[in-house]
Amino acid sequence: MQRRNFNMCPRSDDSNTDTSGIGSGGILPDSTSNESTTGIDDSCSETVAALRDPVKLYRELRDSEQNDVKLTTSEWDDLDEIFNCFVKSGWASNQALAIYIGLSFFPTAVRKFQSFFKDKCTGDIAKHLISLGPCEESERFLFPIFVEFCLEEFPDEIKRFRGILDSADLTKPHTWFPFARAMKRKIIYHCGPTNSGKTYNALQRFMEAEKGIYCSPLRLLAMEVFDKVNSLGVYCSLHTGQEKKHVPFSNHSACTMEMVSTEELYDVAVIDEIQMLADPCRGYAWTRALLGVMADEVHLCGDPSVLKIVRKICAETGDELVENHYERFKSLVVEGKTPLGDLKNVRPGDCVVAFSRREIFEVKMAIEKFTNHRCCVIYGALPPETRRQQATLFNDQDNEYDVLVASDAVGMGLNLNIRRVVFYILSKYNGDKVVPVPATQVKQIAGRAGRRGSRYPDGLTTTLHLDDLGYLIECLKQPFDEVKKVGLFPFFEQIELFAGKLPDMTFCQLLDKFGENCRLDGSYFLCRHDHIKKVAKMLEKVQGLSLEDRFNFCFAPVNIRDPKAMFHLLNFASTYSQNCRVSVAMGMPKCSARNDSELLDLETKHQVLSMYLWLSYHFKQEMFPFVEKYSTMAADIADLLGQSLTNVTWKPESRNPPPKTQKEDSYQRPMSLIKEQQK
Ligand SMILES: Nc1ncnc2c1ncn2[C@@H]1O[C@H](COP(=O)(O)OP(=O)(O)OP(=O)(O)O)[C@@H](O)[C@H]1O
Ligand SMILES: [Mg+2]
């Protein structure tokens, strides 16, 4: 492994080699005389101490007898204070990483060094240090001596920590895919705003190719491409975490990003929504696809935010990069002077966007109560099949469902007959507090209005409240932020190697340790994995799972805030660990939901079945033998959900309501007009 690259301490790996360049640099002629074992109260000798070669200085201390230096009590206290400062020094603890003294071991090492120093120090050194006091300069004086001390005293600790770091090395990720590196790939970046034809053009090449793969950010979009391509006469299969539809004789496939193979050869690969490289949670899947897919032509579709970093990555991989820039077919118009004001003013083709399940239903019910419009709904907890059914209902002209109420789940890539996007609200709960919706997301969602080829080719957008209009305009005007880092997450093999160095840790502790110790190049970040850790923690009580099984169970698609879904996942893992065939212990609902808790129950039931199907494709299939039965059940529940949504007449609840009390500095929105009306 390469040595860590730090500002100071360019030591060679041989701990017996003298260190040049550590410390103040000015080295006096060799002075082996141990002249000052008694106190020398002399500023000249203090300067001498400052200038001495730390390596030699350490050796002298080490080889000297116990000191008989005479210091006053307050001077000893001063020395302790200096060491207290040293042990807290961020600079010193970071520099110590260069010799593989880890952050957790650093305080112990410093305390041992402190005892050693107080036992052995000579008067001139002690006085010099005391004269510096607890400050950066004293840290810089002590550090190189500390380095020598550690190298001699803690070789095992250093070796162990070095092993850990070596196994948590995520640098140079482009070298992880030697087969893709052996190819001369041509990367075509379709770069532009929403509704500019990026995906359309990439798909043209995809369909012309002998063999192609389309990688989607969402199951729903993969299904849309699967349908579209098959309808145009190109046989195409579908491969998502939960579903494999093999179309006979097909050479084309539409998959979700996580499912793309880096072992199969393709002529054309399409990686859609490439800006998701920077997604804090799922970014690693885009990075893996970009670095690893084995295709002669790789088409990337997305906004310009990741263009620079893609250029950098292509320079590292040696791939040729072609950039195709696009403009929006028709510009998006903000209805500047007239916010909607009242939900009574919705018109056919409007999509009202809210960010919680409760608000979505609140809006739907208000519109249906106060107007003659009927609303379809799309939100994240709905199965893709139900979202698609709702989208079709909305797109279809021959019915009364002419308004859509949706969450940000509508934001990516979908082509809907939307004339105007109306933001009911421009803040959302991020799991911690209520924050303004990020500008990139606002643009993405507003970009759903006025799609080319739809019934409304001219797109409009506005807000319900006048107060929010300024923020909407600001978001649309903002240029795309340039992304500096893209996501990475270790493969199982990397975690396994790491676990080998820390055999007594639970999987959850391993993930924490990996996060603390992993090394990354400047263009990469480690993706957030709180979700995985939460599942790992729950599965700790399940005995008998191999590390690989645990790893795979932790990636199962589960809503960690839904206790019922978590309970089922725990059951699946327990049954699997006992080597028994896994089934779902759950009754099948007979009719559509009559109230909100029944609707929530349908959503959960579908998620549980969907999780089962996912597990069946990620574990030995014979352990999950009821795939057909549960697929049918899942489809039936998706239908029931669709029926339920058209009949909603009750007051909905949030699945995960945000805390009631809001901090004063958090984003506040005006109360909805409907609520005011109701008051
Ligand atoms: N050359 C074209 N001929 C006919 N239809 C087109 C053409 N280009 C794009 N379209 C249609 O315009 C709509 C928007 O195109 P597309 O989905 O490719 O946009 P996009 O830039 O990928 O948008 P987003 O960023 O939202 O994904 C689609 O319905 C697509 O079929
Ligand atoms: Mg697109």
Image (cartoon, grey):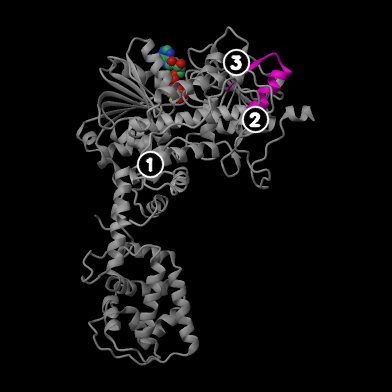
Along the line of sight, the residue nearer the viewer: 622 or 293: 622
Question: Could you give the CA–CA distance between mark 2 and mark 1, rounded to whole angstroms?
Answer: 43 Å
Lower sequence index among marks 2 and 3: 3
Q: Please, what is the three-letter code of the amino acid marked with disc 3? A: Gly
Check contact, mark 2 vs mark 3: CB within 8 A.
no
* Total numbered badges shown on the rendered structure: 3
Magenta part of the chain: 359-377
Tell me the residue at 29%/21% (across/down): 212
Regarding residue 168, the answer to whether it shows in the image is no
Q: Residues within 10 Å of mark 1 (few under 14, many from 20)?
A: few
Q: Give the numbered dot on residue 578.
A: 1
Tell me which corner region of the image, top left, top right, bottom left or bottom right, holds residue 476: top right
Magenta run includes residue 373:
yes
* First of labels 2, 1 by sequence position: 2
Up the image or down, 610 lies above or below 139; here it is: above
Residue under pointer 3: 349
Residue named by callout 2: 359
Is 196 situated above or below 109?
above
63 sits to left or right of 130: left
